[in-house]
Amino acid sequence: MTDKDYIRKFTVNDQTAMAGFYDQVYPKFVLYFRNKFKKPEEYSMDLFHDSYMAMYDNILCGKLTPENLTSSLYQYLLGIAIRKMQAGDRKSHEFEKVKLYHQGEGDDEVLDIKVQKQIVEDAENEDAERKNEEMKDFVERAVAELTPPCDELLRRFYWDRLSGVEIAQAMNYSNADSVKTQKNKCIKKLKPIVAKFRSL
């Protein structure tokens, strides 16, 4: 069964097809996040289920169709999962740096002003983030079409926000200038892929 066939089966809630795809991709999904991101199996299991349901919702609402699938269905699932993981990691890191409560008048603990502002900003940004979600899907699928080392380099630079020095160390480049040169080459390779996706 092809990926496009799976999407068609998902739209009619074909339980056999859904279970088949689940069993096919689950083991390599967990292995991928364990090896690449050092995530424990329990975390990867939860991430898989959340991402699987998000993908399923995208199919049901018509956001993902057989006609606009531009990568493998597994790569599409990975794209959703990676964004969810990074969003969770960023949020955990941000709140680790902020003391959530401080002592108010009397014995009451008051939510820290920085956290209050963050909550307000998150609420204001929710609509914008929702609008950007489709663009993120588009970019993730385009980068997934690249061959190594471009796919990994661009993810480290744009998703992980690593510096040229950090990428050079992680990917065995001689220095940050070499990383910059390679990044520019990768961007050139990405442009025709983006153009192809836009024409679909």
Image (spheres, rainbow, N blue to C red):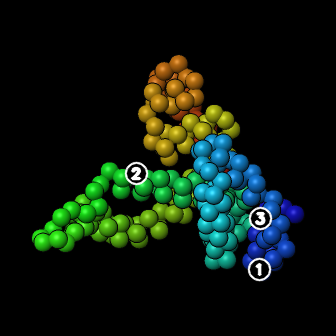
Badge 3 or badge 1: first in the primary sequence: 1
> Which residue is at 61% across, 60% downward?
47
Q: Position of residue 43 (x, y in %)?
A: 60, 57
Viewer can see residue 198: no
Badge 1 or badge 2: first in the primary sequence: 1
Mark 3 neighbour class, 10 Å CA radius: few under 14, some 14 to 19, many 20 or more? some
> Which residue is at 76% across, 54% downward?
27
Q: Amino acid at mark 3?
A: Tyr
> From the image, which quarter does the C terminus lie in?
bottom right
Which residue is disc 1 drawn over? 13
Q: CA distance from mark 3 to mark 1?
A: 13 Å
Q: Amino acid at mark 2?
A: His
Q: Residue furthest top?
A: 174
Which residue is disc 2 drawn over? 93
Mark 2 neighbour class, 10 Å CA radius: few under 14, some 14 to 19, many 20 or more? few
Rendered position, 124 above or below 81? below
> Which residue is at 69% across, 64% downward?
68
